[in-house]
Image (cartoon, grey):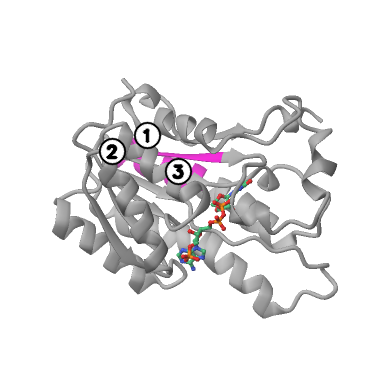
Amino acid sequence: MFSLDGRVAIVTGASSGLGAVFARTLAEAGADVVLAARREDRLAGTREAVERAGRRAVTVRTDVSRPEDCQALVDTAMAEFGKVDVLVNNAGVGTAVPATRETPEQFRSVIDVNLNGCYWMAQACGRVMQPGSSIVNISSILGLTTAGLPQAAYAASKAGLIGLTRDLAQQWTGRKGIRVNALAPGFFASEMTDSYAEGYLESQMGRVLMNRPGDPEELAAALVFLVSDAGGYVTGTTLPVEGGLLTS
Ligand code: NAP
């Protein structure tokens, strides 16, 4: 039930961090993968990892904040593979700016990528996806709680993504047979977490029942569950994968 043999997946933000692990893991489960992000040189590394897993990969330079880029990405996937079974809306940016100092441009740029970009991608995929397809939006525990930093834009974008997930599931599950879910990761090693101030991650670990950050493979396993037949009765939901942080 966890096999993705013969499926075609799009992963945004596949040039680093979690997106690169998601792409490789989907390929190991059997999917061909369309890889999207702005840094093409970094996408090439992920393409090699997918190919090492024995699957086909195509890279498409994409800025998800541009609806025309999102449409072009889906058009390329359709031209190369003839279908899109899975969308992983993973591209995201993190910021921490005190609310009294955050400029409209700073706030808008985070919403534009983390929330609007996921909607442009879902719209373009929703137009071509066939019954049995599945979308997973990568939200965050920051959509559900706080974590000690001033993150209004990031938290609003990730909470918005949970609402978007619920509504697209309502619109598309019954009518189109497309399941729509979200993952809410806790702390996982990536370029985003590498940029945290020294001591920040450690300061949050006391809240995590597992007492450690997550291994990206542990998140990718939850992704495979959601997009495969194993998750066939799951839609409209947000699955936290956070080592128990939300209990605190
Ligand atoms: P990361 O290594 O910084 O990866 C972010 C990815 O998003 C990069 O591939 C980046 O590629 C892409 N991206 C950023 N802006 C983009 C744009 N405008 N258009 C297309 N792609 C764009 O961080 P990560 O931790 O793996 O984050 C992946 C996702 O997980 C994000 O949505 C993040 O909010 C979420 N998340 C992460 C954690 C964690 O602990 N790591 C926890 C909760 C949620 P380019 O720069 O090449 O475009």
Q: CA distance from mark 2 to mark 1?
A: 18 Å
The residue pinned by badge 1 equals 227
Residue shown at the point (69%, 64%) measured from the top left: 95
Left or right: 43, with 142 as reference point:
left
Pinpoint residue 15: horizontal percent, then vertical percent.
44, 58
User: Is residue 176 in view?
Assistant: yes
The residue pinned by badge 2 equals 53
Q: CB at mark 3 closer than 8 A to ligand 1?
A: no
User: Is residue 85 in view?
Assistant: no
Whether residue 159 appears in magenta in the rendering, the answer is no
Disc 3 element: helix
Residue shown at the point (76%, 25%) measured from the top left: 209
* Tag in front: 3 or 1: 3
Whether residue 176 appears in magenta in the rendering, the answer is yes
Identify the mark nearer the N-term, 2 or 1. 2
The residue pinned by badge 3 equals 21
Task: Examine the residues drawn in magenta and state their main secondary structure.
Answer: helix
Residue shown at the point (40%, 32%) measured from the top left: 224
* Tag in front: 3 or 2: 2
Quarter-wise, where is residue 211 in the image?
top right
